[in-house]
Amino acid sequence: MTTSTQPTKSTPSTKELVDWPAIDTVLLDMDGTLLDKHFDDYFWEQFVPENYALRNNISIEAAREILMVKYQGCEGTLAWTDLDFWSSELGLDIPALKVQVGHLIQVHPYVVDFLDFCREIGKQVIMVTNAHGKTLTIKMRKTDLGGHFDRIVCSQEVGLAKENLDFWGRLQVMLGFDPARTLLCDDTEAVLRSAAAFGLGALVYVARPSSRTPARASSSFPSIVYFKELMPAVTVL
């Protein structure tokens, strides 16, 4: 049996990743950041191909190959998350299909604790998502997260996807935040790069967007697995 010396008082257990006194506004992505991306991965990679295959009388493997090409052609654009676009493009009722598997929509651990923490220390908390408005409605109805935010902004309102540098200038005009005193948490490095180029002061990468995949830290941005890592941590005696 080994023994160890116990601290005589509460001490920080990890270096804080965010200088909270220097932050006024917290911007948070939704899918993969606040919500488990397993739902989206399963939906677009398995459930939609199954339904597309059934509609077109082809194999699921053939359907998946066709869809992956279509998906890749729209990444980083507003069309990528536009449910109306995909309903028209694929001949499927995409919102209805999402509702069918809505039981898979889950909030990541410690997200509600983090949102409560941000509000308690007086930060403005805003969700900024590329998700389509219909997706947002489905997910907020399922998770009851909506009441935790001062505002929710979909990229369709801005007119550009978050990967686009000009998105952030438009968002700043809409919201009036000070970029240097703003934190952004996102699970997409391309989004964080565009935000960094605009001058956002604090950027954090969510390294495990899906509960079904291993964490992969960013080589460019501070990375977390759970939001508890951004809350001042104290070793409890």
Image (cartoon, rainbow, N blue to C red):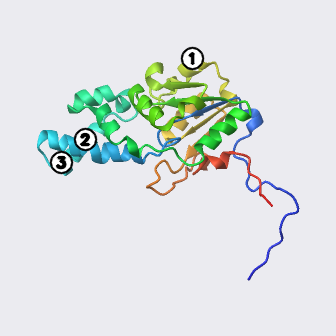
Q: Which residue is mark 3?
A: 62
Front residue (pair 125, 176): 125
| Quarter of the C terminus within the rendering | bottom right
Mark 1 secondary-structure assignment: helix
Front residue (pair 10, 96): 96
Question: Looking at the image, is mark 1 or mark 2 earlier in the sequence?
Answer: 2
Q: Which residue is mark 2?
A: 67
x%, y% of residue 24? Answer: 71, 29
Mark 3 residue crowding within 10 angstroms, few (<14) / some (14–19) / many (20+): few
Whether 5 is drawn above or below 229: the answer is below
Q: Is residue 82 left or right of residue 93?
A: right
- What residue is rendered at 28% in x and 31% in y? 86
Question: Looking at the image, is mark 3 or mark 1 earlier in the sequence?
Answer: 3
Amino acid type at mark 3 = Ala
Q: Which residue is mark 1?
A: 174
x%, y% of residue 101? Answer: 34, 43
x%, y% of residue 17? Answer: 69, 46
x%, y% of residue 40? Answer: 38, 43
- What residue is rendered at 43% in x and 43% in y? 105
Mark 2 residue crowding within 10 angstroms, few (<14) / some (14–19) / many (20+): some
Mark 2 secondary-structure assignment: helix
| Quarter of the N terminus within the rendering | bottom right
